[in-house]
Amino acid sequence: MNINRRSLVSGLSATLLTPCLASAATVTDTTGRTIAVPDKVERIFAAGPPASILVYTFAPDLLLGWTRSHESAQCEFLGVGACDKPQVGRLTGRGNTTNLEVLLKFKPDLILDVGTINDTYISLANRVQEQTGIPYALLDGRFDAIVPVYRKLGELTHRQDEADVFARYAENTIDIIKGRIDKIPSEQRPRVYYGRGPNGLETGLGGSINVETIEFLGARNVAGERRGGMAMVSVEQVLVWNPDVIITIEPAFATNVRSDPVWAPVKAVQTGRIYLSPTLPFGWVDFPPSVNRLIGLWWLAKALYGDLFPEDLRPITRDFYQKFYHMTPTDAQIKSLLVGPT
Amino acid sequence: MGRSSVPGMLIAFIILIAALLLAFTLGRYPISVGDLLHVFTAKLTGRESEAPTTAVNVILQIRGPRVFAAVLVGAALAVAGTAFQGLFRNPLVSPDLLGASSGAALGAVIGIYFSLGVLAIQAFAFVGGLLAVAAVYLIGSTISTRDPILVLVLCGVVIGSLLGAGVGLVKYIADPYNQLPAMTFWLLGSLAAINKADLLPLFGLVAFGTLILIALRWRMNVMSLPDEEARALGVPTGLLRVAIVAAATLVTSASVATAGIIGWVGLLVPHIARTLVGPDFARLIPAAALLGGGFLLLIDTLARTVAAIEIPLGILTAVVGTPFFIWLLTGVSKTWSGA
């Protein structure tokens, strides 16, 4: 159906559209839309942070630019030249910061978005594709879709073999970790509070993208009974929940919570099970919701089920950063990353 | 009128006491009334409490500070609203008329944007509120006009909307995953993150501003007359206006900095106070303080007990406030004239 519309459009404005579209192969994206992919895909415009991280890990040469420019601390954990790529703005999501003329100036062969699949994003993809004449693929951004997403990216770029390496790495990681955790009966799994915000009082409700990997590892999210996104809670409520483990991304909160008398009765504070997640170059637990959370799976598994994961995280981290971020971290860099369990 | 206001003040006082009792007994962490009494008697007599330590901790470190903060913030907003409604001779005025809330909002979102600590964010919000009102006042007073009040209000409206655009800009460029939710939560108002350490500065600033307004009570009565008449009575209207605006802004900024943006209290409570004790500021200000404290305490108790997650205060005050205000408006002409 999409092909028909496309051929109609190209028929009407044949001289304006690039001829490669006519000879395109077709790939079906996660939404079921059929994308006409050009023979050569060398320039990908990533519509948001998850897509840009995905493309960068897979093939930095394909990525035209980042949604937002990075801070120097982030650049230290990315490959040479990664931070020289321009800031291209955000195409979808809350607030468009790219205009379509700028997008066209970058001459992308493909526009890629990774994230929520719903009618809003599908219609946006269709609209941009019609306006620009550039194929627009929308892939599922959920953590458990990481393996098929790499394979799909391989299809879209005609680099199936390279993609397979990443897909198998992810599959392997997930299989090892899930394999050990699956045996634990659910009542023995730790009850986790995920604290964000300056006071640690913002948390992710059940099914929210922020606690996706925590719930993926079978931990019991104390705020998970109610489903939704992010919400504020009171300390009193955290005392009622009395979590076994606190996971946070907020350095100030991770420090204060240990000495704050208000938090003192919480089990996680009494047993010292407060874990501050690494965030460079991208978050290990929470955001952006992309493949950066894959290395976080090891870290989380160790924080939640320490006995089952005797591995040293340092070589695993180095390996991941070499393969996915195209840089080799020094021992000092790895030490600075892993402030939590090692 | 003088004598009839005594029961009015008594009603305001009883509402506050009832709200306090309710607020201390209700909460997400279950604490029996017995334990609650143990904690209080132990605190009063200085002896070791028989209640479990967690109950002591909840009452003294979490629920107690929050209850007092709610009373202080509610009282502050109500007092500032009362002062502004008198000064601008308009019952539809709220304490953020001159940009205190929008200034504080911009200060806070900038603080969040630069990932500052909680104290710094509060300081940014406080200073932002003061600066915004100072700017409005300076611009307003440079424009020579026969109606300085109107110019001031218009300056407040335009500067406020400019600051609102500033907030929008910071939200637009902020990190959508981390900073944007924090900004949204802050702008909706909440006392969930209140800490014992927040209480003293909040109390100091609110008490200072309120005392200034109480000291000016007689002159504020005169200020509700047209400017020429007030001046004919020997009141230096220009100077007095600065003092009232400064005192009201101080308490508004202090409360917004601790609790975020909470609308309606400063608009609604002065009306209820007027129906209870009449338009004399000597009675109106204390009555508004008592009622504002009680009102926000009830709202905050609702916000923290209804669900496991917090309900933002700004949302609750709007939901409760709108129908109540419409109902009040039906009789407002009567009470406003003080008849």
Image: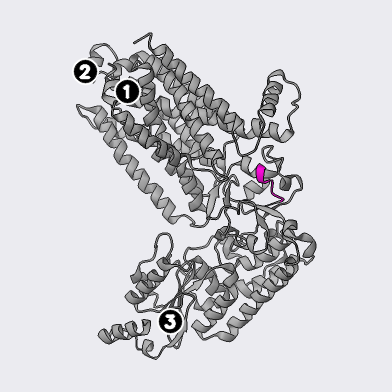
Task: Please determine whether, in this image, residue B77 is positioned above or below residue A289.
Answer: above
Asked if marks 2 and 1 touch (Cβ < 8 Å), the reply is no
- In the current view of this chain or complex, which residue is farthest to the left? B146
Residue type pointed to by label 3: Thr
**Residue A164's quadrant in the figure?**
bottom right
Residue at which label 2 appears:
B228
The type of residue carrying mark 2 is: Glu
Measured from the top left, where is residue A36 in percent x and y? 41, 84
Which numbered dot is residue B86?
1
Residue A43 in which image quadrant: bottom left
The answer to which quarter of the image holds residue B44 is: top right
Residue beneath disc 3: A34
Q: Is A241 within the magenta?
A: yes
Residue shown at 33%/15% (left/top)?
B219
Residue B334 lies left or right of residue B317; in this view the side is left
Relative to B313, say whether A43 is above or below: below
Label the magenta part by its dominant secondary structure.
loop
The answer to whether tags 3 and 2 share a subunit is no
Going 35% across and 15% down the picture, which residue do you hit? B280
Q: CA distance from mark 3 to mark 2?
A: 76 Å
Q: Which of B207 and B43 lies nearest the eye of the viewer?
A: B43
Q: Is residue A120 left or right of residue A253?
A: left
